[in-house]
Image: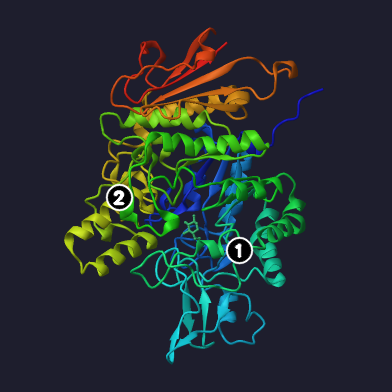
Amino acid sequence: MTPQQPNWWKTGTAFQIWPASYKDSNSDGIGDIPGIVGTLDYLKDLGVDIIWLSPMYDSPQKDYGYDISNYQDVWPSFGTLKDMDDLIEQCHKRGMRIILDLVVNHTSDQHAWFQESKQDKTNPKAEWYMWKDPKIINGERHPPNNWKSIFGGSAWEWVEERQQYYLHLFVKEQPDLNWELEVVRQAIYKEAIEFWLDKGVDGFRVDTCNLYSKDTNFPDAAISLQEEPYQPAFKHFENGPRMHEFLQEQRNVCLNKYGDILIVGECPGSSEETILSYLEANEFSCVFDFNTVDLGTNRTLGGKKHHGYKHQLPDFKESLARTQRLIQQHNVWGTVFLENHDQARSVSRFATDNPEYREAAAKMLALCITSLTGTLFLYQGQEIGTYNHSADWSIEDLRDIDSINAFNDVKDKYNDDPIWNKKAMRGLATVGRDNARLPVQWSAEANAGFTDANTKPWIRCHDDYKNVNIAEQLQRADSPLKFYQRMLKFRHEYRDLMILGDFELHDLYEQKAFTFVKKPKGTAEEGASKQELLVVCSFSDEEEPVDMPSRLKSRESELLVSTLGEESAGKYLRPWEGRIYLIK
Ligand code: NOJ
């Protein structure tokens, strides 16, 4: 009997492309789809199996593509529908798959559905968004409740024509769709989902997929921010009462027709139980939990960007271990990721961007995450160890609406005080989203080789692109990029342990090293081999001991990989070194 093959989306390595900053092929300073096509061989060589393309749909770009005005067209600066057909074909030709971003919690306010809906209270789409009457207090008009938008300010916007407010959990140009209506859900399935699956895409990353069902009583949120008029209300709109019903309908009516596709849901602010409930019902193939990327932030408590704090290494280990345990104990699937377009760079956040150790740290993180169980997602630039921009940048250098709002909140509250402004910028340099959205550093040429020398990129290039770039790293054997290439191959070679195996954390409380074991699933009687992998990662500027779990000490071990070279590996871990031992 041949053992069952795991689904393609379990073993594949995914790579996220954020199109505006990836590669500009027509010298307008904005990345585009033909630019992506031109780099597919590079991605294939890196070891990428699946591409996740962030929104390339037509959009006014208030939230850089997450505000869609037409699901069935491409933003002209990115290209055309024909370019998308080409991209899909070229990926498949190389044996790679491609998934798109599915953004259907909200549309742009420029979408035809909203334009019609806002006209009056009786048009055919009048109820397609979440409209509410104002609250009148002492004869004055107020939003229907005190909910704060995730991007700041009230979550409600007034529309004169209708004399009503509409709900927007993100910016005001992103009205929330009314999932309560079946006709709305059917339109979403047809226009946003089936249109693209019919074109041959292999699945979706589903944006904020746990916000569709809200508490439709719209109660006021409890006051947690004393000095502010609007309050975080996650409890009332995250993982709401009809989520399972909606997602199951979406699976049954729509997705199931397309076979074994990848549906990976973005699930911020969700407990393990909630995540498990989505996975066990097969509503998603796997999800992005926020265990690791929320470290050091107070996101769900309404914390500001400058409220960030440095987490401890045990918190990092535990955040990853939580997902590993979920996969292992409940026989569901998960993801492994440290970066995406909403997150600052992992080297800076979770390791070190001290120039002396930065490359070593980038390789150590590569070794660490490629050894974990789940579908691995990498983000553009991660493979070369891109690090955060400097805190000396000014707000004019940034483009992200969330960052700009966060800065302006501080600026307004403290009357443009330079020290407060500096504090706000430091926060953004640590966790701001533009860290991930700077042009990809292709080479040491002008504009990092992202666009041509005479064109101004839409956003500033990283200051250090002459040192940190793909062209240089491709021709240097000990570069982070070459190490990623090696590890992605290795991950397939040791698939049963690295991608599919069980995880055992060693010494959670150790502050300078992260040590874990990957074991085969199943017992020896079931045919599983006895071999295990010991993974040791240093998070230290000094030498550290290799701490082998006692139960492995009597077994023969062989050093398979060292991020700093197997031949020179001694008794102790060098600063920020990572190693893998095969335990026989
Ligand atoms: C989550 C996306 O990842 C983020 O970039 C976006 O701003 C919000 N959802 C709203 O769509």
Give neighbour class at mark 2: few <14, some 14-19, many 20+ (Cα, 10 Å): many
Q: Is residue 233 visible?
A: yes
Work out whether residue 144 or residue 204 is closer to the camera in this orientation and state it.
144
Give the image location of residue 354, x and y in percent: 26, 34
**Which scheme is used to colour this image of the protein?**
rainbow
In the rendered image, the residue lying farthest to the bottom is 139
Of 165 and 367, nearer the camera is: 165
Type of amino acid under label 2: Ala
Q: Is residue 389 left or right of residue 257?
A: left
Disc marking residue 429: 2
Which secondary structure, mark 2?
helix
Q: Is mark 1 on a helix, strand or loop?
A: loop
- Mark 1 residue's CB less than 8 Å from ligand 1: no
Name the mark on residue 212.
1
x and y percentages locating residue 337 in the rendered image: 50, 40
3D distance between C-alphas at marks 1 and 2: 31 Å
**Residues at badges 1 and 2 in contact (C-beta under 8 Å)?**
no
Give the quadrant of residue 183.
Answer: bottom right
Q: Nearer the viewer, mark 1 or mark 2?
A: 1
Return the x and y of residue 50 as percentages of the image width and height. Answer: 58, 41
Q: Farthest residue toward the right?
A: 1
- Does the Cβ of the disc 2 residue fall within 8 Å of ligand 1? no
Residue 222 vertical position relative to residue 283 in the rendered view, above or below:
below
